[in-house]
Image (cartoon, rainbow, N blue to C red):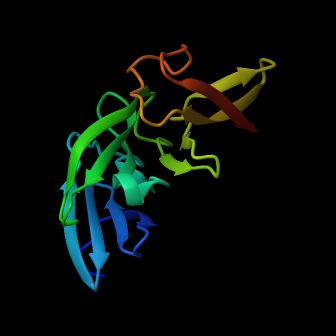
Amino acid sequence: MEGLTNAWDVVFLPDQTLLFSERAGMISKLSGGKKTELLRVPNVLARGEGGLLGLAVDPDYDQNNFIYACYNTAQDVRVSRWIINADATGLIEQKDIVTGMPISSGRHSGCRPGFGADGNLWIGTGETLQSVLILKTQKVWAVRFYVLIGKEQVYPAISLLHSTTGFTVMDIVTLRV
């Protein structure tokens, strides 16, 4: 397909309509060979390796028409949810689900949402090029994964290491040397 700028992620709706993101902030669909722009996500910061990144389709899409996207802003990395409107020509009713995930220089600031078989929303993020020192000599990079149990609530814009109302949040850090 011509005319795309940094196409990033692809997901399929239950009817096999393809949705895709472009790093600068556009969410579009491809159906019947035709591209339709659904939304330019507000406040996307496309810098370095960041921007509008991962997409996910709600497992209950047939009942709620929800889609989710991970993206970088000037303040944080976040996940928002939208509803695909009735005639599938746009996204409406943005709701921030997770805000406050760390962002730094735009390097290693990836983000990918996905649903597990149990219906929980999982979010994988980069370590934002922030290293952890272990045993005074070994530099280790941390890759963080977050799981949100209860996808209907809003996660407050506070540190992910604090407990919050309405969610059980696990901060799982995997390390690579």
Q: Nearer the viewer, residue 142 or 111?
A: 111
145 is higher (above) or lower (below) than 32: above
Pick the quarter of the image with the C terminus.
top right
**Which residue is depicted at the point 58% across and 34% down?**
146
The percent coordinates of residue 76 (x first, y second) are 37, 30
**Which residue is depicted at the point 61% across and 49% down?**
116
Instruction: From the viewer's perspective, tell me whether residue 32 is left or right of residue 111.
Output: left
118 is higher (above) or lower (below) than 148: below
Instruction: From the viewer's perspective, tell me whether residue 24 is left or right of residue 59.
Output: left
Q: For residue 156, what is the image quadrant?
A: top left
Pick the quarter of the image with the N terminus.
bottom left
**Which residue is depicted at the point 22% across and 65% down?**
88
119 is higher (above) or lower (below) than 172: below
The residue most toward the right is 135
Instruction: From the viewer's perspective, tell me whether residue 113 is left or right of residue 116.
Output: left
Residue 25 visible, this angle:
no
Residue 128 visible, this angle:
yes
The percent coordinates of residue 21 (x first, y second) are 34, 60
The residue most toward the front is 63
153 is higher (above) or lower (below) than 15: above
Q: Nearer the viewer, residue 60 or 160?
A: 60
**Which residue is depicted at the point 63% across and 27% down?**
170
Q: How many marks?
A: 0
The percent coordinates of residue 78 (x first, y second) are 39, 36
The percent coordinates of residue 53 (x first, y second) are 40, 52
